[in-house]
Amino acid sequence: MNAAREAFITAMRQVAATVTVVTTDGPAGKMGATVSAFTSLSADPPSVLVCLKSDSRIAKAVTGNGTFCVNVLPEDAEEVAKRFAGMFDADTTNRFEGLDISDSEFGPLLPRATAFTCTLTHRHVHGSHAICIGDVTGISNAGEKPLTYMSGSFHIVRPKQAG
């Protein structure tokens, strides 16, 4: 493996990321995948970006549907994160099966997730990933503490004690 690539991967493992599931639904199909590369982009207009492996099923579906939903998972949703990461695909082909989802025209909203529904406005491929920018069309603020991922495992966020 390239030494610079290995150093980059090792350093990035130390960066905590909120665990999100990007969903989409429409003519290109209903799809969902766990994604760690998500961030706000602008408040004027409200917009976010997600990075998806450019040749993945989720990237193709988001592009084909022109919409997506970013679901920020609550801290106790580790199994949901694993499910949408494909860890249980051998047992079930429908990642949404058994979940109490709310359908939207942008993609399914997952239970107790803070969700951002988006219209895809720009897609830019850089290296192995597509940077998908979406204008936020709706927000469902669940008010839950988020699940995070760092150094190969899931974590929960707690405030630092004053003192």
Image (tube, rainbow, N blue to C red):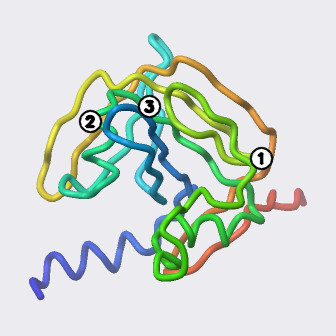
In the image, is residue 152 above or below residue 41?
Answer: below
Classify 10 Å Cα crowding around label 3: few (below 14), some (14-19), many (20 and above). Answer: many
Q: Which residue is mark 2?
A: 63
Is disc 3 placed on a helix, strand or loop?
strand
Q: Count all numbered tags in the image, as a single digit.
A: 3
Query: Do residues under tags 1 and 2 come within 8 Å of each other at their CB atoms?
Result: no
Between the C-alphas of marks 1 and 2, the distance is: 26 Å
Q: Which residue is mark 1?
A: 112
Q: Left or right? Give the position of 161 relative to 149.
A: right
Q: Left or right? Give the position of 116 relative to 146.
A: left
- In the image, what residue type sits under mark 1? Arg
The residue closer to the viewer here, 81 or 14, is 81
The residue closer to the viewer here, 137 or 3, is 137
For marks 1 and 2, give the one nearer the viewer: 2
Q: Earlier in the sequence, mark 1 or mark 2?
A: 2
Q: Which residue is mark 3?
A: 48
Image location of residue 110, percent across then percent down: 67, 47
Q: Earlier in the sequence, mark 1 or mark 3?
A: 3
Is disc 1 placed on a helix, strand or loop?
loop
Q: Left or right? Give the position of 70 relative to 26.
A: right
Between the C-alphas of marks 1 and 3, the distance is: 20 Å
Residue at screen point 53% across, 78% down: 88
Image location of residue 10, percent across then percent down: 34, 80
Image location of residue 34, percent across then percent down: 48, 60
Classify 10 Å Cα crowding around label 1: few (below 14), some (14-19), many (20 and above). Answer: many
In the image, is residue 18 above or below residue 118?
Answer: below
Residue at screen point 47% across, 52% down: 32
Residue at screen point 26% across, 34% down: 64
- In the image, what residue type sits under mark 3? Val
Image location of residue 6, percent across then percent down: 22, 82
Between the C-alphas of marks 3 and 2, the distance is: 15 Å
- In the image, what residue type sits under mark 2? Thr
